[in-house]
Amino acid sequence: MDHEFSEFVAAQTRPLLGLAHALTADPHDAWDLTQETLARMGERWGRSRFDEPAAYARTVMTRLNIDRVRRLRRELPMLSTREEQPPVVVTGELDGWLVEALATLSPRQRTALALRYVEDLDVRGIAERMGCSEGTVKSQLSRGTERLREHAREHGPLRTAVGREDWA
């Protein structure tokens, strides 16, 4: 394996895994997505010249996740029931609430929010990564944020915050 690529993998695996977890809301799917992203980068490493390989890897990951969701919808139409999936192990109360809340979002909403708040991209950058219009990104961010607020009012920290249920 190329020494430069080995250094890239060592430096980027953890950040990519964090993004993948935000995109998939499942640690096992996140690891699979990270490995597939690194495999795709490795296939092209010697043949292509990347201006920003980390940014390109995140774009690859985002598109792979979109393809994964589409494939799952076609292959497993009964997958929509969340009760059958194994629980996600988290370390803190907020983390548990957040993982649960992210699981209530549509894949496109979760992707848009992850790119906005994990990757700190603006609307234009998110649209480029997701391969859609800026208007679509804005609506996905708005709808996803509202769904997270609703979940927080019903199940999360806003339910118990200083005795008020309507903070958001």
Image: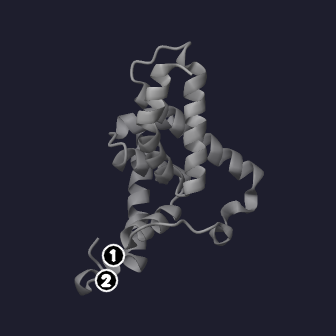
Badge number at residue 14: none
Q: Is residue 7 visible?
A: yes
Q: Position of residue 87 (x, y in %)?
A: 58, 69
The image quadrant that residue 39 belongs to is top right
Judge by depth and name the residue closer to the eye, 141 or 163.
Answer: 163
Residue lying farthest bottom?
Answer: 163
Residue at image coords 26%, 83%: 164
> How many residues crowd around disc 1 within 10 Å: few (fewer than 14), some, or many (20 or more)?
some
**SS for dot 2:** helix
Q: Which residue is mark 2?
A: 160
Judge by depth and name the residue closer to the eye, 110 or 41.
Answer: 41
**SS for dot 1:** helix
Label tally:
2
Residue at image coords 42%, 67%: 91
In the picture, the quarter occupied by the C terminus is: bottom left
Q: Indicate whether 50 appears above or below 33.
A: above
Badge number at residue 157: 1
Q: Position of residue 140 (x, y in %)?
A: 45, 51
User: Is residue 89 toward the left or the right of residue 155 in the image?
Assistant: right
Q: Indicate whether 146 appears above or below 16.
A: below
Kind of residue sitting beneath label 1: Pro
Residue at image coords 39%, 63%: 146
Q: Indicate whether 149 appears above or below 6.
A: below
Asked whether the residues under the numbered discs 2 and 1 touch, taking CB atoms below 8 Å apart as contact, a structural biologist would say: yes
In the picture, the quarter occupied by the N terminus is: top right
User: Is residue 30 toward the left or the right of residue 163 in the image?
Assistant: right
